Image (spheres, rainbow, N blue to C red):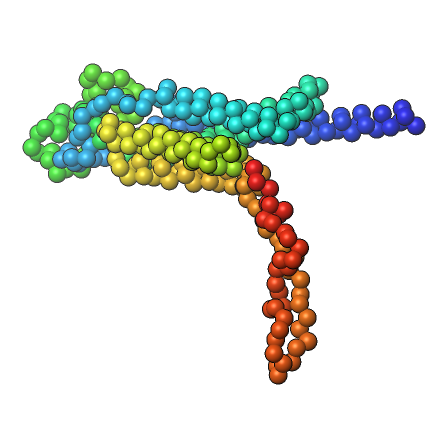
Amino acid sequence: MQPTTEAADSQTALRAERKQAQRILYDLLIVILAVIPIIICEFGIEPYRRGFFCDDESIRYPFHGNTVTEVMLGLLAGGLSLVMVIIVEFVRFYRRVELSERRNFFGWRMPVWLYECSKQISTFTFGMLLVLDATELGKYTIGRLRPHFMAVCQPILTDGTTCNDLSNRHRYIENYVCAGNGYRIEDVRQSRLSFPSGHSSIAFYVTVYLAIYLHYRLTWRGSKLLRHFLQFILLMLGWFTALSRVMDNWHHWSDVLVGILLGIVGAVIMTRCVAKLHKDGRMCNLKLSLPRAPTTTTLQEVISTPPPYTLNTMNGFSNQQYCTKM
């Protein structure tokens, strides 16, 4: 009977690995599908060509470099999130004395805490791709001109005149070419991609997601304020990134506002509906069995018993019997 049992266990393990491989394959396919719109927008199409008024002061600001560069944003989105998830998951499993536990992953006995890290990071990355998809869709559909559009584009009308000519004042210009003297072609192209702010949407997605993640996954009895202080630092990183976009004349305030909303909505949906951090964290569903007291008393009698539904306090139940404090 023993060989039969071992064969059955082997078949069960093989089916489980096949299902796992199938699930990973499907997830990779979905991630690739999420990346495709970003590639198409960045390399395949041109943004909507929006016209402008020559005397529009909102697009006549000088050009400045980025205070928060794309490299810095990448370090925030990739580096900081990766390091934070690894540290938090390691500490959680270390405190629960579960670091030695392992899980079979295609023949490799993978540590469970590392497997949990990969799950959290993959969910976080997928959500960030979706937020970036929504941002790119807005940029290339609206084609809003950045505050420094005039300084970078230096438009020349089809009749050879420019916006400096008095005859073009108060005119809505649609047919023009950008001289772009002193600027790269990519700078000219980027000058028509103001709405919404990509820096703001990504920064707020990352910081809000990590703040919610810390709320449910990080505890330290040495200080009740540590988690909240880290959350504050994260949100301030996102806030400063958003403010810098207006400060550097790369976005209008409304672009930044919509970018912030996109990031927050994306982070809340991912943590609530996909990662479901609230089910593994500090939420406590207190379900008490309320005994029913006798209700045979008539209207003429003095009621000496408690109301029909009361909490039986004689049993000495405490809140910790229903909710485990992390």
In this view, the residue farthest toward the left is 166
Is residue 216 visible in the rendered structure shown here? yes
Residue 311 lies, in percent from the top left, at 61, 60
Could you tell whether 294 is left or right of 153 in the image? Answer: right
Could you tell whether 283 is left or right of 135 in the image? Answer: right
Could you tell whether 202 is left or right of 299 in the image? Answer: left
Is residue 133 visible in the rendered structure shown here? no
Is 70 in front, or is 302? 302
Residue 309 lies, in percent from the top left, at 62, 65
The correct choice, above or below, for 221 with respect to 301 in the image is: above
Instruction: Point out the image quarter for the N terminus.
Output: top right
Is 67 in front, or is 323? 323
Residue at the (66%, 55%) spot, across then down: 315
Instruction: Determine which quarter of the picture holds residue 164.
Output: top left
Residue 284 lies, in percent from the top left, at 57, 46
Residue at the (51%, 34%) spot, across then down: 221
Residue 145 lies, in percent from the top left, at 25, 32
